[in-house]
Image (cartoon, rainbow, N blue to C red):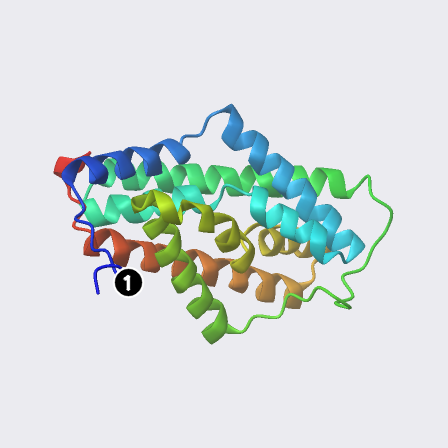
Amino acid sequence: MNSLFQSRPYTDEERRSAVLNVIDNATPDRDFYLLTVGAALFALCGIALDSIPVLIGAMIVAPLASPILALALGFATKDMQIALRSFGVLVLAMLVATVVASIFAHFLPPFTINGTYISFIAHPFYDLAIALIAGAIASYGQMRVKVGNALTGIGIAVSLMPPLIASAIALGRFDVNLFYESALIFLLNVAGILVGSFIVFVAFRITTRHQ
């Protein structure tokens, strides 16, 4: 029976390593902002071209999930310094992405978001459920090195950058319906990832002594 299932204890050293990894990924350094800008431009071009492959590229490149995981870690460990820092990084990354996309949108030929392949219509139950699962698996992947390879799939499954950029475009065009739908998708995804990862961090008994 042991050949079919191998139980492996989780050590305090592994917990500390996972905590450092989560915090390091959410560090607002040059790499973080380069990925943010690149993902924003990918998302803008994907929306303009109505191209799913380009949007998938934006989902994979975007580092927005990292500060959300760090925010959940701050809540799980009751460390408000990490929580506030991570929230600030998330907000700043959102501002950078939307400002960059808004500026570059003026240099693109006129385009419409026609929804032939891409549509920003919120499905609250499914959006939140997918984000919860994604947050749980993403945080679990931080704990288990073997599962870390699944993070690319998580980036594709849950959409953060595309609806954020769509809401920025809608705001510039005074398109209330598009803004509401795309912003709702983004907020549901953030909330789902936050709650799902928080549950996993608590389940792994991550505490302040592991920091």
| Up/down of 129 relative to 107, above or below | below
Residue at 68 percent across and 44 percent down: it is 42
Residue at 29 percent across and 45 percent down: it is 143
| Up/down of 61 relative to 8, above or below | above
- Image coordinates for residue 135, horizontal then vertical, percent: 39, 56
Residue 172 in view here: no
**Rendering quarter of residue 13:** top left
Point out the residue furthest to the right here: 109
| Up/down of 95 relative to 47, above or below | above
Q: Quadrant of the N terminus?
A: bottom left
Decide which of 132, 41 is in the foreground and name it.
Answer: 132
- Image coordinates for residue 56, horizontal then vertical, percent: 64, 52
- Image coordinates for residue 184, horizontal then vertical, percent: 52, 64
Point out the residue furthest to the left here: 209
Residue at 46 percent across and 42 percent down: it is 91
Q: Is residue 106 left or right of residue 37?
A: right
Find numbered disc 1 in the image and state the secondary structure of the residue it sits on. Answer: loop
Count the numbered circles shown. Answer: 1
- Residue topped by disc 1: 4
Q: Please tell me how crowded label 1 is: few (under 14), some (14-19), or many (20+) other residues with Cα within 10 Å.
A: few
Q: Is residue 8 left or right of residue 157?
A: left
Point out the residue furthest to the top here: 30
- Image coordinates for residue 155, horizontal then vertical, percent: 52, 51
Residue 183 in view here: yes
Decide which of 47, 60 is in the foreground and name it.
Answer: 60
Q: Quadrant of the C terminus?
A: top left
Q: Is residue 103 left or right of residue 160?
A: right
Mark 1: which amino acid? Answer: Leu
Residue at 37 percent across and 42 percent down: it is 87
